[in-house]
Amino acid sequence: MIEFTFWDILRNLLLAARWTVVLSLIAFAGGAVVGLILTFLRLSSQRWLQYLTALYVDLFQGTPLLMQLFLIFFGAAALGQPISAWLAASIALTLFTSAFLCDIWRGCLEAVAKGQWHAARVLGMNYYQSMRHVILPQALRLSVPPTVGFSVQVVKGTALASIIGFVELTKAGTMLNNATFEPFTIFALVALLYFALCFPLSCYARYLEKKLYDAGLR
Amino acid sequence: MGSLDFLTLLPYTSDLLKGLLTTVVLTVVTTLAGIMLAVVVAYLRAHGQIWLRRGLGTYVEVTRNTPFIVQLFFIFFGLPGLGIKIDAITAAFIAMTLNLAAYSAEILRAGISATAKGQLEAGRALGMSALQSYRHIVLVPAFARVYPSLISQAIIVMLGSAVVSQISVFDLTYAANFVQSRNFRSFEVYLLITLVYLLLAFGLRRAFMLVGSRVFAYQRGETR
């Protein structure tokens, strides 16, 4: 029997928190790339592409993240191609993130006043030029606060990877609890570590939101 | 295992229905309790004593910045460490209610702050009591304004409730775990209940919106 001191617990949790950070970064980066592609597909003039991306967003926003994880994890196995919890979590969280970011970014692009489009077109710019020089720069400014705000949801979402056995912060917490029987200390520490990751992001998002508001853009 | 076979799920219909019922009841009860608690929290954060405001502010921030599953584990596994024993379904109920209340209090706060101070004073001048004017002039219009956001949050909590299966509450996800441990058809059963969650999210949104359009019908002229 190994005795765990408070510092052993904290050190192990901190080591596991690395994987929460790595998984969050993968999900966010992957989600941003897929989300960007989806946003442009959603804005295309093809009706069926608009419907398809809207359906994609609704499916991911209307089902539990846990089920998305399970379907990818067990679905790959059912197809005869089992994947690791690590890969399943990365894929599920990337798709989940992409759906939400697509929705956020579409909202930002649509929030740029219609008159801006008209003005750009009247000045003789074509679609791509108007997008590139007039609409995107404005939409980009609007999109930063909600995007940073959503990153908090991504970090919290990684906790579900623990359920399919990926050892990140939450899973490390349950494992340490099984070894030490100090649930109060351990889960309080786990919560505190998540808070330390998420709260600065929340504050930053709020600060950015306020700056936009003060600039009269919201 | 090659093709999908949903027929193997048929013998487990009653288990899945039992799980569905638990998820629905948990959602409806925590939505009502969570929003009531949110009203109290939002009110006290605006008008309470300074220490109370700080305390509630901490509760809201901690809840919004930690994963729901950790909150659930803390309540179910952590609190017994302090001598407070609770069963799984109660822990799920408490965790979901506290989670929804924290988000809803923030949503309500935005709605409440949109009411001009002069309106409240006008209410008092018309002879309403402090409570009456707060209720009719601030609270109900605030509710009507943010009602759609509150519904979305309640749906998010419903979807998040899938993790209460992890403390062995017999909800929809637990039922699915149970079934796949018997018939080894994990993909089929999870696909089925994902669809059920999707329909549930859609149905609950429609139902709550219908209730809202009735309750806030007289507000419509003002808020739109």
Image (cartoon, coloured by chain):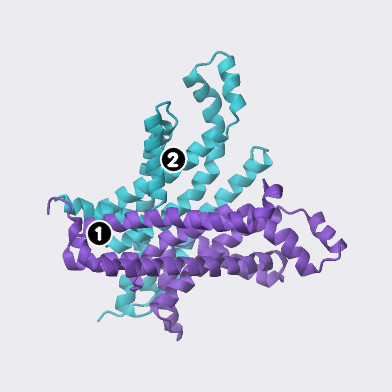
Q: Quadrant of residue A13?
A: bottom left
Q: Are marks 2 and 1 in contact (CB under 8 Å)?
A: no
Q: Is residue A199 visible?
A: no
Residue B137: x %, y % from top left: 75, 59
Chain appearing in cyan on the rendered image: A
Q: Amino acid at mark 2?
A: Cys
Relative to B137, does residue B169 appear above or below in the rendering? Answer: below
Disc 2 crowd rating (10 Å Cα; few below 14, some 14-19, many 20+) is many
Relative to B153, does residue B88 appear above or below in the rendering? Answer: below
Pointer 2 and pointer 1 on the same chain: no
**Circle 1 sits in a helix, a strand or a loop, which is it?**
helix
Q: Quadrant of residue A45?
A: top left
Q: Residue A102, labelled with which disc?
A: 2
**Circle 2 sits in a helix, a strand or a loop, which is it?**
helix
Residue at point 47%, 62% (across, down): B66
Q: Residue B189, labelled with which disc?
A: 1
Give me the chain letter of mark 2: A
Disc 1 crowd rating (10 Å Cα; few below 14, some 14-19, many 20+) is many
Residue A124: x %, y % from top left: 55, 13
Instruction: Give how far apart the Cα atoms at labels 2 and 1 are.
Output: 29 Å
- The C terminus of chain A: image quadrant: top right
Residue B48: x %, y % from top left: 71, 70
Residue at point 33%, 79% (across, down): A180
Left or right: A198, with A168 as reference point: right
In this rendering, the count of numbered labels is 2
